[in-house]
Structures are given as structure tokens and as C-alpha cells.
Amino acid sequence: MAQHFDTVDEYIASYPAEVQGILQEIRRRCHAAVPDSSEMISYGIPTITLGGKFVVYFAGWAHHVSVYPMPNGDEAFRASIAPYRAAKGTLKFPLAKPVPYELIGQAAALLAAERRSGTA
């Protein structure tokens, strides 16, 4: 049975310590990239919001962490995320490799810009 979490803190605390650190850093980078953002649990996972609307979701899994959805970005950005593209709209980062936090922050900033412009 899936666990229910009321807060992002509860969600992150449900993971082993090493994964908690990764999820906390993703959370921090997303908030830094999206000024005036808030957070909530939506669809059972942490969600960064802006003006009450979702901007970016992130989640922990057994062997990776994921960030959803993928922003459009320019050609250089699309090339930089290519190794992490998974299912439609998903960026998947293996836990066994260094997590590209700067890229995640960039994705969050692009998603926020799309949300603000009404293209998301």
C-alpha cells in the first residue's frame, strides 16, 4: 500500500539518509530557482508551486530520483538533459551517479518561466 504524506518533510524523511540528502538538495535548488515558490504534496510526491499552480515535481525511487515535467528550453538545454530523459516528460537521475543539481535548478527555472508566461 502506498504511503500518504502530508508534507514534503514527511516524504523526504521516509527515505534512507543518503537519499534524503539528495532530495533536500533538489528541493533547495528548485526553491532557489523559483523565487516566491511554495511546496506541497501532489500526486503523492513533492511539488514546487508558484501562485498555487504546480511548477515542478520531484520524487525518490529505489535506484533513481526523478524530476517532472521537462521544460522545453533551447537546443543547448535539450542536449544537456538528453542523457536523463526517461518516460514522457520525465528526467531520471540514477542514485549511483553524481546528481546534476545545477541542471535540475535550470530545469526548475525554465519551468517557472513557462508557467509565468502561460505556456506551461
Image (cartoon, helix red, strand yellow):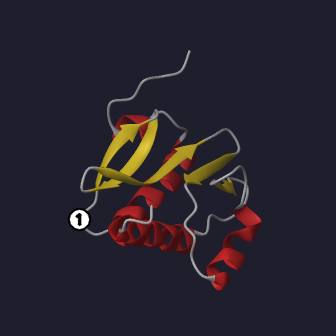
Q: Residue furthest front?
A: 118
Q: Quadrant of the C terminus?
A: bottom left
Quadrant position of residue 67: bottom right
Within 10 Å of disc 1 (Cα), the crowding (few <14, some 14-19, many 20+) is few
Q: In front: 22, or 6?
A: 6
Q: Position of residue 63 (x, y in %)?
A: 71, 44
Q: In front: 72, or 44?
A: 72
Q: Quadrant of the N terminus?
A: top right
Q: Amino acid at mark 1?
A: Asp
Q: Position of residue 27 (x, y in %)?
A: 41, 56
Q: In front: 94, or 17?
A: 94
Q: In front: 115, or 26?
A: 115
In the displayed structure, does residue 81 sit left or right of residue 41? right
Circle 1 residue: 36
Q: Residue furthest bottom?
A: 76
- Against 56, residue 16 (above or below) is above
Q: Secondary structure at mark 1?
A: loop
Which residue is painted at 36% across and 71% down in the image?
Answer: 117
Quadrant position of residue 98: bottom right
- Against 110, residue 115 (above or below) is above
Q: Position of residue 14 (x, y in %)?
A: 48, 33
Which residue is painted at 24% across and 56% down in the image?
Answer: 51
Quadrant position of residue 55: bottom left
Q: Position of residue 114 (x, y in %)?
A: 43, 69
Which residue is painted at 51% across and 50% down in the image?
Answer: 58
